[in-house]
Amino acid sequence: MKILLLYVLLCFLGLSMTVFVDLISGMSLFSTLQSLRTTLRTANSMETTAMALFFSAPFIVVIVDSLTNKKRQKK
């Protein structure tokens, strides 16, 4: 669970730093968020697959870890 919290925190910090730098450079909040949306929309299928894989990786690790702990407890 700590891994998921850290993963979400790092994702939030990365996005907030991007928005903060854009705001400091003089862009409006709307154009900053529009820039993020455009970046995510223009990703091709391979990039989208990689993003989905990296997004789901921490969840997979937690699920596998909990399943292996349950198996160890049954022994």
Image (tube, rainbow, N blue to C red):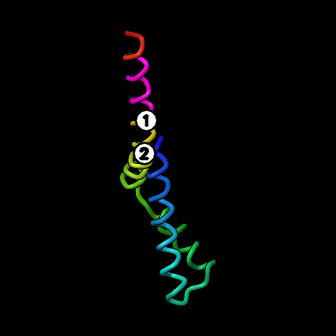
The residue where tag 1 is placed is 62
Amino acid type, mark 2: Ile
Contact between labelled residues 2 and 1, with CB atoms less than 8 Å apart: yes
Question: Where 43 sits versus 24, above or below?
Answer: above
- 18 or 41: nearer the eye? 18
Q: Quadrant of residue 34?
A: bottom right
Q: Name the residue at 44% across, 59% down.
A: 10
Amino acid type, mark 1: Val
Q: Which mark is residue 20?
A: none
Query: Which residue appears farthest toward the bottom when viewing the image?
Result: 26
Please say whether residue 68 is one of the residues in the magenta stretch. yes
Q: Name the residue at 47% across, 73% down.
A: 17
C-alpha gap between disc 1 and disc 2? 8 Å
Q: First in sequence: mark 1 or mark 2?
A: 2
Query: Which residue appears farthest toward the right when viewing the image?
Result: 30
Please say whether residue 67 is one of the residues in the magenta stretch. yes
Dominant secondary structure (helix, strand or loop) of the stretch shown in magenta: helix
**SS for dot 2:** helix
Quarter of the figure with the C terminus: top left
Residue 6 in view here? yes
Question: Where 15 sits versus 70, above or below?
Answer: below
Q: Name the residue at 44% across, 27% down.
A: 66
Q: Which mark is residue 3?
A: 2
Q: Name the residue at 37% across, 50% down.
A: 50
Residue 69, image x, y percentages: 40, 23
How packed is label 1: few (under 14 Cα within 10 Å), some, or many (20 or more)? some
Residue 18, image x, y percentages: 47, 73
How packed is label 2: few (under 14 Cα within 10 Å), some, or many (20 or more)? few
The residues colored magenta run: 62-71
